[in-house]
Amino acid sequence: MKKKSASRSAFFNLRVSFGFVLSSVGVFLALMSLSVYSNSSALAAGAKQGPGVIIGASYHNDVSPALRDQPAWAVQAKQEHEANLNPLIFNDHKDAPDLVVDKGTLLSQLAPSIPAPILNFAGISFPGVGCNCAPPDTNGEVGTTQYVQMVNTGYQVFNKATGASVLGPNSIESLWAGFGGVCQTSGFGDPVVVFDQVARRWVITEFAGSSIPSDYCIAISTSDDATGTYNRYGFHLGSNFIDYPHIAVWPDAYYVSFNIFNSTGTAYLGPQPFAFDRAKMLKGMPATFVTFPPLGGNVAPFLPADLDGRKLPAAGAPNTYVGWPSSGVYDIYHFHVDFGTPANSTFAKFATPPAARFTQLCPGNRNCVPQLGGLPAQGQGLDGLADRLMFRVAYRNFRDHESLVGNYTVSSGGVAGVRWFELRGVTAGPVTVFQESTYQPDTTWRWLGSIAMDRRGDIALGFSASSPTIHPQIRYAGRLASDPLNKLAQGEAHLFDGNGSQINTSNRWGDYSDMTVDPIDDSTFWYTQEYYDATSSFNWRTRIGNFKF
């Protein structure tokens, strides 16, 4: 369960009366969706793919006031609270020797060529606009003139040229003021912001619910100014427990992945893909979603491809979902959505290219990453979160090929290392693993990465770094397109070195970070991640920085 804020016992009993009337079409579609969802657990049992298309509709949509005109959101002080553990997911991984370890070169370690940060400034800090919780779920995105950062449960807008704050930090709930329902009153966290580079709009999301997370709240800005007005949508996704949502931009839809559990959060039903009608949402019109039942409790989590760059995928190209390779292959799924005739929509496995063998990091152990002054044996290690792909899976179309990059954490040489990969041909096929390696140059633990590729094919990977002799740090490494394959040959840089460790609180760390690319020059990388400035509990900080090859 991924509920993020504190003292929710009273919150569990809250029931919201919606102050608006659904249209007859919306009622019909919502009831249809709920009817199908009531049987989704049965459909998912033992099945790798559900038999039918599920459709649903926004139960309410409107346009917000301009965020810059909103008063500061009054937030009730809450007791410090660690986020409830992610429910356990299926894992059939078999450990095997890692044959693609990248130890770096002496030159790249002693004299790295990786560029230093251009900007390096503080993001939102604990308590995260009244959340009083851990972890922060740090993420952010760069737009035409601004950078937007989100944490549990707040957002802040910065001038991307100077790093100066333009708006906030303010609560995510303030964005939903006047909307009504659980999106306004009962956000559960797991926030994500992406920038739709094609439409030049901001997309801000959070899940919500009156007792369990079952609703998805999506806000689309009406311009490229993140402080302006937003088209707001509330979607009820059924009676199951939705977890770990991540949204991606594609020309025909906003695609989302969820990890689905039963209503009590005790049984994993598998990952589930959703497609939300991007065209309608950009116009502020009532919108529908298309989905399929959860894929089953024997299927590992996946993430949808998030579009970067000016060149779009081929017309009608499906969105690609990539699964964590627990079984030794990258399960590649194609989602073709048809909002005009939803029954024509398809979600199917497209390819299974082999992943290089690896050893899973600390399976079933949320207390495995050491830190100075807080060792796992003392109960003060950090969560490796090594049972899924890390946000984002970034897609880019070049003139002669298409590339998709992603990463996850593995065990290598007795420490955590970041396994990164580049797949090619992901929409048209054949899908191939163009390159992959485990970045583990020394005995420092590196984990919780995020990766992206610029317009030239250069790659940057950001991550947390820690060991028994250092406090958690924020670092990044990279490669040029001309470097030898499978190597982060430009070496490593430090964005920010923490001055403290997280102790006497949740072992959780992350749950994700975010590497993105400036849509204007299509070359400048932006990274945001958490750290601690003093050894303490419930006192996380976040940092934002950018650099350019």
Image (cartoon, rainbow, N blue to C red):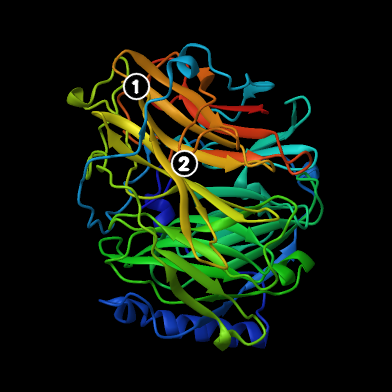
Eye-nearest disc, 2 or 1 = 1
Amino acid tagged 2: Tyr
- Report x, y in % for residue 131: 49, 38
Q: Secondary structure at mark 1?
A: loop
Amino acid tagged 1: Thr
Q: Secondary structure at mark 2?
A: loop
What residue is at 39 percent from the left and 63 percent from the top? 331
**Residue closer to the observer: 238 or 14:** 238
Q: Is residue 154 left or right of residue 485?
A: right
Q: Residues within 10 Å of mark 2 (few under 14, many from 20)?
A: many
Q: Earlier in the sequence, mark 2 or mark 1?
A: 1
- Separation (CA) of disc 2 from disc 1: 19 Å
Q: Is residue 540 left or right of residue 171?
A: left
What residue is at 40 percent from the left and 39 percent from the top? 437
Q: How many marks?
A: 2
- Report x, y in % for residue 232: 69, 61
* The furthest residue to the left: 377
Q: Which residue is mark 2?
A: 512
When asked about the image quadrant of residue 523, the answer is top right
Q: Is residue 546 left or right of residue 191?
A: right
Q: Which residue is mark 1?
A: 444
Q: Is residue 75 visible?
A: no
Picture layout, residue 254 above or below residue 414: below
- Report x, y in % for residue 164: 75, 25
Q: Is residue 93 left or right of residue 189?
A: left
Q: Is residue 492 visible?
A: yes
Q: Residues within 10 Å of mark 1 (few under 14, many from 20)?
A: some
